[in-house]
């Protein structure tokens, strides 16, 4: 529809800006008729971070970060090497995975079902855009829609990162005024642990995190 096209256009225009994830999540929530959404950062070697949160109460966040996150199926996916894709938590639960986590976090947050896109970001992490429903599961038709629009979500995210990194690279200047052309480099060992990263990688990764933190402040 014209309204959907206009909303999608707003998301496209926000790529490279600190409003991108909020705009993308809101667009997806309205498309899938979800009441709430949140954006998380998952890492293989650290606790998850809340980038944007319109879903969980302060108490639920505290309990989650105190240790419940260790049972989070999305974190387990990332730590097992699955860093991108679209997933529906009720389907993961029905497959026999971590019912204790679902019982606790769903009850605290009044969640009936959740769908999430995992999106790759620099540094071995993933951003998760999570859509929540309070009264019904995602149907087979909903899952077909999730799958159909997944390439669009991934493409928008890639464009966003490219623009963020392009803007960051433009700011890498040395004292003589000549911009560095050195590529950002990260080397990991066979276990996935970082063993070397040059200055360019550190700067770019920090600036991506800074942009996402600014988005969180905007929602506060």
Image (cartoon, helix red, strand yellow):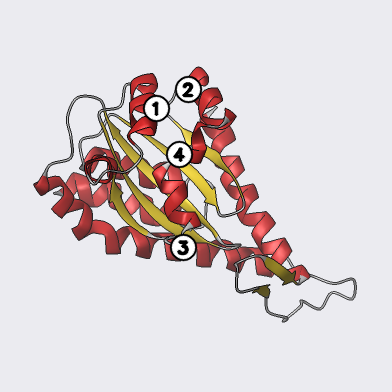
Q: Residue at x 10, y 47 (%)?
A: 140
| CB within 8 Å, label 4 to label 1 | no
**What is the C-alpha distance between the residues marked 3 and 4?**
16 Å
| CB within 8 Å, label 3 to label 4 | no
| CB within 8 Å, label 1 to label 2 | yes
Classify mark 2: helix, strand or loop. Answer: helix
> Residue 51's spot in the image, x, y percent?
53, 40
> Residue 107's spot in the image, x, y percent?
34, 21
Counting residues from the start of the chain, the first of labels 2 and 4 encountered is 2
In the displayed structure, does residue 154 sit left or right of residue 42? left
Q: Which residue is mark 3?
A: 81
Instruction: Check the image and name the residue furthest to the bottom.
Output: 181
Q: Residue at x 36, y 62 (%)?
A: 154
Q: Nearer the viewer, residue 52 or 192?
A: 192
Q: Residue at x 61, y 62 (%)?
A: 123
- Give me the disc on residue 105: 1
In the displayed structure, does residue 63 sit left or right of residue 137? right
Q: Nearer the viewer, residue 154 or 156?
A: 154
Q: Nearer the viewer, residue 15 or 199?
A: 199
Q: Which residue is mark 4?
A: 71
**What is the C-alpha distance between the residues marked 1 and 2?**
7 Å
Counting residues from the start of the chain, the first of labels 4 and 1 encountered is 4
Q: Which residue is mark 2?
A: 60
> Residue 52's spot in the image, x, y percent?
49, 36
**What is the C-alpha distance between the residues marked 2 and 3?**
27 Å
Mark 4: few/some/many CA within 10 Å (<14, 14-19, 20+): some
Q: Residue at x 89, y 76 (%)?
A: 176
Classify mark 3: helix, strand or loop. Answer: loop
């Amino acid at each position: 529809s014209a309204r959907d096209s206009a909303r999608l256009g707003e998301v496209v225009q926000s790529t490279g800006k600190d409003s991108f994830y909020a705009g993308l999540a809101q667009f997806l929530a309205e498309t899938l008729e979800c009441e709430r959404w949140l954006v998380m950062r998952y890492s293989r070697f650290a606790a998850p971070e809340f980038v944007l949160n319109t879903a969980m109460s302060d108490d639920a966040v505290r309990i989650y970060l105190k240790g419940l996150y260790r049972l989070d199926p999305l974190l387990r996916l990332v730590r097992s090497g699955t860093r991108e894709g679209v997933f529906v938590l009720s389907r993961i639960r029905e497959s026999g995975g971590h019912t204790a986590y679902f019982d606790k976090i769903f009850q605290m947050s009044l969640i009936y079902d959740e769908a999430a896109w995992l999106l790759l970001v620099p540094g071995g992490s993933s951003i998760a855009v999570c859509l929540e429903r309070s009264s019904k599961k995602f149907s087979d038709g909903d899952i077909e829609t999730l799958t159909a629009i997944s390439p669009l979500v991934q493409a928008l995210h890639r464009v966003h990162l490219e623009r963020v990194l392009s803007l960051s690279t433009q700011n890498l200047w040395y004292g003589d005024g000549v911009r560095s052309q050195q590529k950002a480099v990260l080397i990991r060992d066979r276990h996935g642990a970082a063993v070397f990263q040059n200055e360019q990688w550190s700067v770019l990764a920090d600036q991506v995190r800074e942009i996402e933190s600014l988005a969180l402040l905007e929602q506060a």
